[in-house]
Image: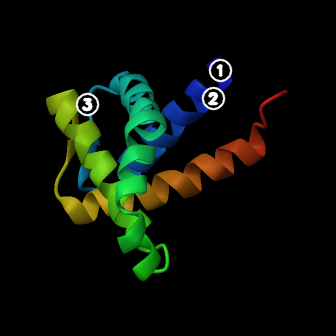
Amino acid sequence: MITRLIISTLAVLITSYTLDGVHVDPWWWAVIVAIVLGFINSCIKPIVKFFALPVNILTLGLFTFVINALMVLLCSWLIGPHFAVANFWWALAFSIVLTVVNWLLHLFFPSKK
């Protein structure tokens, strides 16, 4: 669990330093962002995806990107000034880049089960 938290924190830091419209300040708030995003993605996102299922089917799954961006905006709203996302498009870019970076970090540092 600690390894996943460290990898998620690194992914948040790398992604926030890569994108201009996303800021984590100071850097240790990336741990809080990783925890809050993990909570949102495990508790709130499944409920939202369930209710958005008809739209998601009509868009062939592309509406999932919108849901991911909304979850990032919710995280930004919950954390406040320490995690700032400029607008919806930066949240969308953040969610896509974060997914790719997280996947790459998990390739290099696989979790032991």
Picture quadrant where residue 47 is located? top left
> What is the basis of the colouring in this image?
rainbow
> What residue do we see at 35% from left, 62% from top?
52
For the residue pair 94 and 70, the one nearer the viewer reads as: 70
Q: Residue 38, percent across and down? A: 47, 33
- Residue that badge 1 annotates: 1
> Crowding near pointer 2: few (<14 within 10 Å), some, many (20+)?
some
Residue 109: give its label.
none
How many numbered dots are placed on residues in this image? 3
- Secondary structure beneath dot 3 equals loop
Q: Secondary structure at mark 1?
A: loop
Q: Which residue is mark 2?
A: 4
Q: Is residue 101 left or right of residue 104?
A: left
Residue 8 rendering spot, x and y as whole percentages? 54, 35
Which one is in front, 56 or 41? 56
Q: Amino acid at mark 1?
A: Met
How far from the left and from the top, in percent, is residue 79?
22, 28
As drawn, the residue found furthest toward the right would be 113
Mark 2: secondary structure: helix
Q: Amino acid at mark 2?
A: Arg
Residue type, mark 3 in image = Asp
